[in-house]
Image: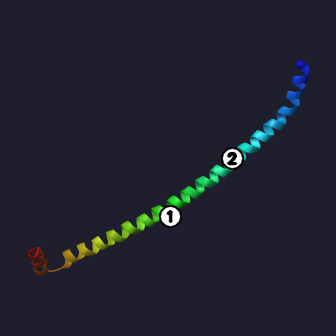
Amino acid sequence: MLELFLVMMTLTSPVLIIILVRHYFRYKSAVNQQLLALQKENNNHTARTTQKKLAILIERVIVLEEIVTDSNTKLRQEIKQL
């Protein structure tokens, strides 16, 4: 009886190993696809956020350039109005 069990295990082990390896690689492929989709979504979000920050910084630079290049009289008037 033990011999029969050992023979059955010897014959079925390679098949079981092949099945397990195939399922593992299918699972790994599916997880990699999900990971790539999440990375792409994150990159898109990051790009949009960066563009918004850049627009804000451009506006600030424009204001600072106006302050630096304006004559002192206009700047004094604006300060007095505040």
Q: Residue at x 74, y 44 (%)?
A: 23
User: Is label 2 in a helix, a strand or a loop?
Assistant: helix
Q: In the picture, which quadrant includes the C terminus?
A: bottom left
| Tag 2 residue | 27
Q: Position of residue 15 (x, y in %)?
A: 84, 37
Quadrant of the rendered structure where residue 10 is? top right
- The residue that mark 1 highlights is 44
What amino acid does circle 1 point to?
Asn
Q: Where does the image place residue 32, in percent across and percent down from the top left?
A: 63, 51
Q: Nearer the viewer, mark 2 or mark 1?
A: 2
Answer with left or right where residue 49 lies relative to residue 2. left
**Do tag 2 and tag 1 residues touch (Cβ < 8 Å)?**
no
- Calculate the distance from the C-alpha at mark 2 to the C-alpha at mark 1: 26 Å
Horizontal arrangement in the rendering, residue 23 relative to residue 61 (left or right): right
20 or 55: which is nearer to us? 20
Task: Measuring from the top left, give residue 1's x and y in whole percent.
Answer: 91, 19
- Using a 10 Å C-alpha cutoff, classify the residue at mark 2 as few (fewer than 14 neighbours), some (14 to 19) or many (20 or more): few
